[in-house]
Amino acid sequence: MSVDSQALQQPVEVKKESRRESAFSRIAKYSGGRIVSLFITVVIGVYLTILIANMGGYVDQIRKGQIRDNLYARLGNDQTYKQLPESEKKTYADALIELEEKRLGLDQPFILRSLRFLWDALSMNLGRAQFMSSDTGSRQVRLIITERLGTTLLLMGTANLFLFFSSILIALGLSRSYGSFLDRFFIALSPTSAMPAWFYGIFLILIFAAVLKILPFGGMIDSPPPKTTIGYALNVLKHLILPASSLFISSFFSSVYNWRTFFLIFSSEDYVEMAKAKGLTDQMVQRRYILRPTLPTIITSFSLLLIGMWTGAIITETVFTWPGLGQVTYQAIGFNDTAVIVGTTIIFAYLLALTVFLLDFFYALVDPRVKLGGSQQRS
């Protein structure tokens, strides 16, 4: 290679390297901005949860009463306390109550307690639960939540994966057979998706558990559990069928109807007719010219559906006694355990923020016109 050709190639390589650096810096800036904005949203939501869960300080008054009741119950069995003069008993008990309130921070103003609780919640440093405990007997809020997080992800992930892929495949098929009996059948059943998942869960339990007796009423594993790994996995799968099916059925028909409508709209475009005129197969036309342009809209619709499922997991898991975050949240509300309520809320908030954050990157993967952090889109 001559000196002149090397001199001409160097500016080209420098230009390519600068483009890579520009794209990387643009993506980094965009990602940083999205993370900050989503984090602010999470902070506001968690702080509002703290205010609501604590009822403006009313729960703290309840906790003070519980501290006093528990202390007097414990002192009732204390022989040393019984031997004290009556005049000293109250002073001794008040001193112990004051120490316990200071340990819990109940002697500070509510605004300071709430801000401190906010920081602890965001860092998942929520201390000990008041009434609840984990499966291993620990009362650490972090352990109570992390033990149940995996089971919720298993249930939601299974239901949503089946929902996403089956809805797309059936919607594509219906768009090719517009006006057929099957098309009208799915349109007629689309309003059934207005019912929540737990509504269908009750009927599934009645049919398959109470009447047919082929599936369990609830839970995640039989008692005693199977000893082999394969037997354990199959047993979990058997318990997973009904709750996953209720989540699936509650959104299946509306998803098929909505996405079938998108496919029909795009199938009437001129470039689709041109592709058909070139002699391309129906499968290739569906995949390249109908499915791909609609994927951003489908992903948006699916992400919103996923967010709705996250928030509806509380009642669904409770109906099936599925040991996930939803059931923990329901129990925490019943016990008025503020730390666990805030802990489950922050986990759900993080999961929702992660869903929204990843949505933009999926846009860039399925649609080359989208540039992360770019100010314009190429048509």
Image: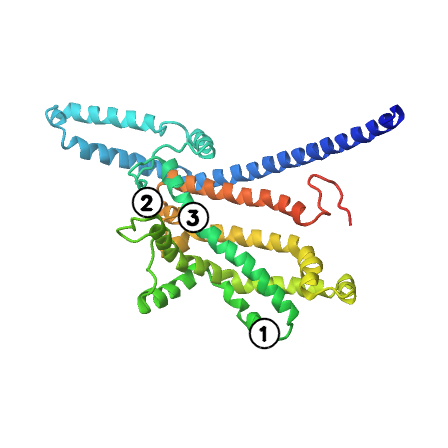
The tag on residue 335 is 2
Q: Quadrant of residue 114?
A: top left
Location of the N terminus (image quadrant):
top right
Find residue 12 and report its horizontal and vertical position in percent.
82, 31
Q: Amino acid at mark 3?
A: Thr
Q: Amino acid at mark 2?
A: Phe
Q: What residue is rendered at 69% in x and 33% in y?
A: 24
Please tell me whether mark 3 sits on a helix, a strand or a loop: helix
**Which label's residue is closer to the chain start, 3 or 1?**
3
Q: Residue furthest front?
A: 1
The CA span between labels 3 and 1 is 35 Å
Camera-near label (1 vs 2) is: 1
Circle 2 crowding by C-alpha within 10 Å: few under 14, some 14–19, many from 20: some
Up-down: is 225 above or below 132?
A: below
Up-down: is 224 above or below 357?
A: below
Pick whichever, 104 or 204, lies toward us: 204
Q: Residue furthest bottom?
A: 181
Can residue 258 be seen here? The reply is yes
The tag on residue 184 is 1
The CA span between labels 1 and 2 is 48 Å
Pick whichever, 368 or 277, lies toward us: 277
The CA span between labels 3 and 2 is 21 Å
Up-down: is 364 above or below 127?
A: below
